[in-house]
Amino acid sequence: MASTTVQIHGADITIRTYQPTDDIEYLTELLHRAYAGLAAMGFRYHATHQDSTVTAERLNGDLSFIAERNGIIVGTVTLYKTLPEDSCEWYASNGVWHFGQFGIEPELQRSGLGNAMMDIIELHAKQLGATELACDTAEGATHLVNWYNKRGYRFIQHVQWGVTNYRSVVLSKTL
């Protein structure tokens, strides 16, 4: 993917694919910052406490994206293909791709950057053959559930992941 530049609060932000030279420690710290508000609400998302090894493993999904402002990473999201052995029934369905490890620098949350990154992963998933794009989030994080609903995502199922302390809702959008 060629990079895409978006204007957020008067600044150019470049969205590009993840490169192995990207700083994994910095990305891990970004995820911790991005999820800190959710942690303060009592939700133990994997990204609130994962170490850099987990970040690297997750970034090596099918397609990861990085957002940069002035050369500094301010966002990330990873797109995953259908996995028949996946522990979530919907994620294992034919044609369903999902995304995760979606984090935006706190000062840029609610700025439009998350929407710009979602537009890119939805487009790429469709171009790569996905018929549905799904995600999961804490059932009690109603602000996130509502945000995804506004983007056209609908409830599919509940799932309890071993690395979290909450029940998740799986949401999906037809592409």
Image (spheres, helix red, strand yellow):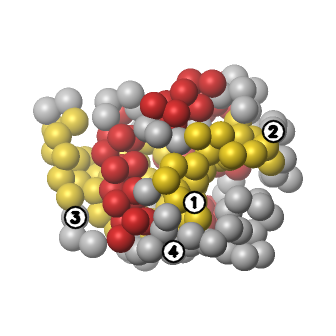
Type of residue at label 1?
His
Mark 1 Cα-neighbour bin, 10 Å: few <14, some 14–19, many ≥20: many
SS at badge 3: loop
Q: Determine whether 5 is above or below 58 in the image.
A: above
Question: Which residue is denoted by mark 4 in the rendering?
Answer: 62
Type of residue at label 2?
Arg
Question: Which residue is denoted by mark 3 in the rendering?
Answer: 3
Residue 167 numbered tag: 2
Task: State the separation of the CA atoms marked 3 and 2.
Answer: 36 Å
Task: State the separation of the CA atoms marked 1 and 4.
Answer: 10 Å
Foreground mark, 3 or 2, reads 2
Task: State the separation of the CA atoms marked 4 and 3.
Answer: 17 Å
Q: Is residue 36 visible?
A: yes
Task: State the separation of the CA atoms marked 2 and 1.
Answer: 18 Å
Residue 98 numbered tag: 1
Could you tell which of marks 1 and 4 lies nearer the N-terminus? 4
Mark 4 Cα-neighbour bin, 10 Å: few <14, some 14–19, many ≥20: few
Instruction: Identify which residue is drawn at 48% across, 68% down.
Output: 130
Mark 3 Cα-neighbour bin, 10 Å: few <14, some 14–19, many ≥20: few
Horizontal side of residue 46 vs 148, given as left or right: right
Q: Which of the 4 image quarters holds residue 65? A: bottom left
Q: Which image quarter is the N terminus in?
A: bottom left
Horizontal side of residue 170 vs 108, given as left or right: right
Could you tell which of marks 4 and 3 lies nearer the N-terminus? 3
